Amino acid sequence: MATVEDRQFRVEPFPGGTPGNQRLVEEGRLPDYDVVGTRPIRHDGTDKVTGRARYGADIKLSGLLQGYVLRSPHAHARIVSIDTSRAAEVPGVHAVCTNADMPSADHRAGDLGEGMVDWYHLNQNVLANDKVLYTGHAVAAVAADSVHIAEEAARLIEVEYEVLPPVLDVREARGADAPVLNDDVRTDRQPAGETGDTPTNVAKHFHYEKGDVDAGFAAAELVIEREFTTETVHQGYIEPHTATAFWSPDGKITVWTSTQGSFMIRMQVAELLDVAISKVKVVPMEIGGGFGGKIAVYLQPVAAVLSRLSGRPVKLNMDRSNVFDATGPTPGSYMKVKIGVDAEGKITAGEAELLFEAGAFPGSPINPGCMCVFACYDVPNGRIDGYDICVNKPRSNAYRAPGSTHVALATETIVDEICEAQGICPVEFRLKNAVKEGDERVDGVTYPPVGMWETIKAVELSDHWQSPLEGPNRGRGIASGFWFNFGGNSVVAATVNEDGTVSLIEGSTDIGGTRASVAMQLAEILGIAAEDVTPTVVDTDSIGHTDVTGGSRTCHATGLAAIKAAEDIQAQLRQRAAMLWDVESEQVEYGDGATLTGPEGKTISFQEISGKLTQTGGPVVGRGSVNADKHGGAFGTHIADVEVDPDTGKVQVLRYTVVQDVGTAIHPSYVEGQMQGGAAQGIGWALNEEYHYGDDGRLHNASFLDYRIPTCYDLPDIETIIVEVPNPGHPFGVRGVGEVPIVPPPAAMANAIFRATGVRMRSLPMSPPKMLHELLASDG
Amino acid sequence: MAKQRIVSTSINGNPVEFLAAPRQTLLEVLRDNLDLIGTKEGCSNGNCGACTVIFNGRPVDSCLVLAVEAEGGELETIEGVALTDGLHVIQDAFLGQAALQCGICTPGFIMSTKALLEENASPSEDEIRFHLAGNLCRCTGYDKIVRAVQQAAEGVTN
Ligand code: FES
Ligand code: FES
């Protein structure tokens, strides 16, 4: 078999896209599908362009009350007392609640699909009664005839606080004399399985080691060690959190909310309110963005408690400042990373120490950070230590490839320094060191077939890389990134209609076009058009347990379920045709063009047999249920051209290309959209976004004016090159796409900035003041 | 709460009268009183554009307009954009170019685009990006939105 280096590739436009939308094609190998790889109009599109789609805040119910949540003005304080009596007396108020109205919780771990949670901590995060641990921490809530009455009443709630000093920085929080946030937290050391015996902010310590690290560094010709910091950032979804709940007199709770995982909301509401999951129905509304931040509950249990107390349905909406103050964010970090290379530019060893902010309660994505830090390269000897550290900020949450963007800044910047020092082209270095099938990561995982090398090849062949960049203060950088992707549980049911169409119901909430990409996979198997499948996302009583829309899993795992359902339909239709023709079902084939064929040239189309189901035993429903475990990791490499204004420090992105191995692109437009959107978030993280805290622990920029995410005027066209190295764990080769594209941008920008200015930025964001400071410092 | 006032206005070509308290924003009244939920709330302080409507021919953030200010004015919301026999060219273009992912920003972008194209039928890419900079989208990276506006502009000028 030819080695990968002998294979011939070219970059060409991806059919149906604009000129900036391209793909890497290997000579002699082009996927051959009818529906997969085409660009049908998404099924839910018309509702979304006409304003008819109903998002979380759009629910209307008779007797609906509006609520308001009272939040802590302090970053760290003990709650001495809460007096709600005056609020309860306000005319128009129907219920007031505090943590005392919820069942007490104990320390047990729960799995939310993109992170673990301790039920006691989640209970305290939803409504605190012991300590408040960040400004905006919820302490009480009111339900009233209008949100204005609820707000006015909430202001009459008297909370007495004993104010404590806050700690906001991971390095300080780790120190012996730092204020401890949670008396119950002890350091949990993994994989050793040991637990510390004193209260601490260091909730976890992960340690991974492979090979002989000291020998690896001794064998290196060049060793570079650097420190990096990143600030706390927010997912920044445009739709604020919202929840509406009705606690019926028969004990059943219905929750209408926008969430990445309705079954995860069901589990959390049931657990926190101590009711059976079967008593909770979660109705997923359309969701206005999540990126990992709409998995954990905030308002849902509170709305349910207010409903129980008032006997009426209750709606709670956050405003934008609540969203910044009390939800999200993804951690700030401190990282020290060291890489050694031999004279040929092959990596000999890597070492990393990573400190991530957990926020108020344990649970930062430090473990994925550890697993991603050297994931792109064949690192024969490695040692990684990662720490999850509580600080007085909101409880951190997943944000698109959680943990990977941080560590890519460190590794990819050092790789660029190595290339610079050794005079190696960054593309050549990466081709030489890229992980391939069979390579083992430092945390012990061996790679299945992966496409890291192919993404670099695509960079090398791209018009962007081959076009010279000229002009003063301009530079080009590249960087790579990795995400595991995920499989997990998904269920669909598909009913064949008499007119030859299929109604597809699923439990995966659709954040970015997955109704279409899942329906397309069913259509491909059945040989029908994507438009002949009608996908619907249903509530938790109407379909089996489906994990979160997150981890880049939906197109892969819910797609697998849809494929299974289609195969189930095929098997049932073969029986029906056998019945019609009076033959055995083994004699019937479901072939191309959606046609069933039997002995003696008998044929019947999918359309025709769909009209004969009543005569042959009744309607046909296909079922697909999976717990997918062959997701296949994914890699991306980005090219950034920047210009740095020497007078202001402002960095302008001139040209940007996202290259990513997606396995197989089901709906290329939405694949490109994920790549572009992830890159835009990464560029925002790189250049602008950060939480600004005062010394008192108050967040100073809880608005979209002051927490500035990129606008369309800040960004250039974002070019895409889709790489398709099929995942052997999926019939069409799907890997998943959503998360990888946020990983490379900060490092790609930092590397481009270096080439523009000669200044290495090792601290995010690379905002004008910081950039200018470094520029002036470098001028001496 | 202060006494409510009667406000007479025109919404999507139809005369509408509604009651509003002086403190209520136009966004709140559209969504809560008039059930025009297609206009979205992302920030309620004029920073995201999700609540964009066209007020007397100009795009405005309805969260920054008091409902009582709509007295005697003409409003267009996302609910009035589609034609009786199909989608508006802008809506078609957003669908055709896959210019939405979660879709929460889409009504606001469509209203801003409509206002732009009514003023400038063939904007350059720079003009499009400048005009739409008040509308935030966190999902798409804007590339496909800009393509959609370009496609719509061609449709409008043809
Ligand atoms: S809701 Fe009006 S601008 Fe954001
Ligand atoms: S499509 Fe989600 S914010 Fe624009």
Image (spheres, coloured by chain):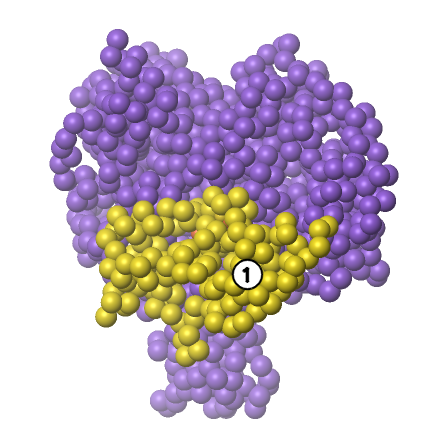
Chain colours: A purple, B yellow
| Residue where numbered disc 1 is placed | B71
Q: In this view, does A394 lie above or below A543?
A: above
Q: Nearer the viewer, residue A622 or A756?
A: A756
Q: Which residue is drawn at 44% across and 22% down?
A: A229
- Horizontal placement of A157 versus A533: left or right? right
The quadrant holding residue A339 is top left
Residue A746 % position (x, y): 36, 32
Q: Which residue lies furthest to the front in this view?
A: B72
At 61% from the left and 36% from the top, the residue drawn is: A326
Q: Position of residue A154 (x, y in %)?
A: 75, 40
Report whether A725 appears left or right of A598: left
| Residue B100 drawn above or below residue A742 | below
The residue sitting at 52% across, 31% down in the picture is A701
Residue located 46% across and 50% down the image:
B49
Mark 1 belongs to which subunit?
A: B
Q: In this rendering, does residue A539 appear at all?
A: no
